[in-house]
Image (cartoon, rainbow, N blue to C red):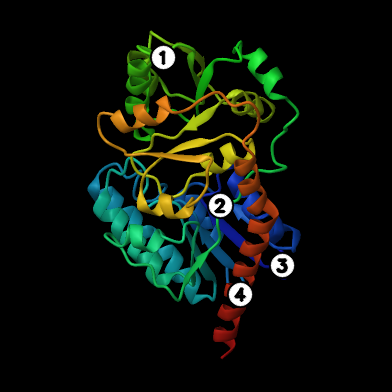
């Protein structure tokens, strides 16, 4: 049974395999809050049933709500269900924080419902947490973020989270890379929306005129996506692949061995992968979008390409990459400026401020 004297934070959804989630709550948990994470809507309803004054709901990704509806009608039903759950909890005095990770979930099926859900959250949230200062401008075509509620807490790096015991020489030897090889890394879940259908052909074209080019691919891949990726794999360059989860120790091997991390996304609001790359001192290739250009202004380790359909700009950007002699100092300095501890402390301050304001208004 719950201890009613301990303030509770219900996190929805709480993905245990996403390290960002645990990093965000480190200070909150250490301060004595009871953190309860759920991933399904029915579990969320049960988790918030006992919440009242002094408790907090933190909504992260919205994909478990409208996105998974069987059809449009079921998606609307789930949106209404979620709204009723939150409204009832707020009437009992619970506070609500929403973190905006994306404009809408990737591969959105029910756009109208997602927009309605986002507008509900911006209206009812006591605070809206964004990681990119330009978030309001990016999402404005679909919904408006109230400036008086919006709080910027940047995505942290992963310093101190993953082992960093391998040297570049050791990592490249483990993967069979020569000093003169130029290794392009794509690490993470391999999904179509992440732009692999543009990256792979671009590397294949580049490989026609450039020797020593190596593609490093690592991350979970479902069967349907694996079939699509297989058809696109370049045959004129060397490809080193690992189509499954990369454990914490081996993560360093892939990054430290790489000369650049390619993130060929079509649309991206925030990128934990870019921060992961910075943590290991590896330059990154990002789409040249205004909000990303502003976020990484003046960062020499960040290279941009235009997200055109044929990948010509990406190919040209890749052609400029040369083998690293050591970790990129600018990338490491950027990682050091955005530590996990700093992000966790800022989020704790936000949560406590929202909780105190909610309690004060209830008393008043």
Q: Residues within 10 Å of mark 4 (few under 14, many from 20)?
A: some
The residue that appears at 39% across and 51% down in the rendered structure is: 65
Disc 4 versus disc 1: nearer the observer: 1
Which residue has dot 4 on it? 353
Q: Which mark is residue 6?
A: 3
Residue 359 is situated, as x and y percent measured from the top left of the image, at 60, 80
The quarter of the picture where the N terminus appears is bottom right
Nearer-N-terminus badge (2/3): 3
State the mark number for residue 344. Answer: none
- Residue at image mark 2: 155
Q: Decide: marks 2, 3 in contact (CB < 8 A)?
A: no
Q: Which mark is residue 210?
A: 1
Quadrant of the image for the C terminus?
bottom right
**Residue 227 coordinates in the image, percent (x, y):** 35, 16
Mark 3, Cα crowd under 10 Å, few <14 / some 14-19 / many 20+, is few
Q: Distance from label 4 to label 3 (Cα)?
A: 17 Å
- Residue 109 versus residue 341 in the image, above or below: above
Distance Cα–Cα, label 4 vs label 1? 55 Å
Viewer can see residue 34: no
Alpha carbons under labels 3 and 1: distance apart: 61 Å
Distance between mark 4 and mark 2 Cα atoms: 20 Å
- Determine the image quadrant of residue 310: top left
Q: Is residue 15 visible?
A: yes
Q: Residue at x 42, y 71 (%)?
A: 124
What SS does tag 3 mark? loop
């Amino acid at each position: 049974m719950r201890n009613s004297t301990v303030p509770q934070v219900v996190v929805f959804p709480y993905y245990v395999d996403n390290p960002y989630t645990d990093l965000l709550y480190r200070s909150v948990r250490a301060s004595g809050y009871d953190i309860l994470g759920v991933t399904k809507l029915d579990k969320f309803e049960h988790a918030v049933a006992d919440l009242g004054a002094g408790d907090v709901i933190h909504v992260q990704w919205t994909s478990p709500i409208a996105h998974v509806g069987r059809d449009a009608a079921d998606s609307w039903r789930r949106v209404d269900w979620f709204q009723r759950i939150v409204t009832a909890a707020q009437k009992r005095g619970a506070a609500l924080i929403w973190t905006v990770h994306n404009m809408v979930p990737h591969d959105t099926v029910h756009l109208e419902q997602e927009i309605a859900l986002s507008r509900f959250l911006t209206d009812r949230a006591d605070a809206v947490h964004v990681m990119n200062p330009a978030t309001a401008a990016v999402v404005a075509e679909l919904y408006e973020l109230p400036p008086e509620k919006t709080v910027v807490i940047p995505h942290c790096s992963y310093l101190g989270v993953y082992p960093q015991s391998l040297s570049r020489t050791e990592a490249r030897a483990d993967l069979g890379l020569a000093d003169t090889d130029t290794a392009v890394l794509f690490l993470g879940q391999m999904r179509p929306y992440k732009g692999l259908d543009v990256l792979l052909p671009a590397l294949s074209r580049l490989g026609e005129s450039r020797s020593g080019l190596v593609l490093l691919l690592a991350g979970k891949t479902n069967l349907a996506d694996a079939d699509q990726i297989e058809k696109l794999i370049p045959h004129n360059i060397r490809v080193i692949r690992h189509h499954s989860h990369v454990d914490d120790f081996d993560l360093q091997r892939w990054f430290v061995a790489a000369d650049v991390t390619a993130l060929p996304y079509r649309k991206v609001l925030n990128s934990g992968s870019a921060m992961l790359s910075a943590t290991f001192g590896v330059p990154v290739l990002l789409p040249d979008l205004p909000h990303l250009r502003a976020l990484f202004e003046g960062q020499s380790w960040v290279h941009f390409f235009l997200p055109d359909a044929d990948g010509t700009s990406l190919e040209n950007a890749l052609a400029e990459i040369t083998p690293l002699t050591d970790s990129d100092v600018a990338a490491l300095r950027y990682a050091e400026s955005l530590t996990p501890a700093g992000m966790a402390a800022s989020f704790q301050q936000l949560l406590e401020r929202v909780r105190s304001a909610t309690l004060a208004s209830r008393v008043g």
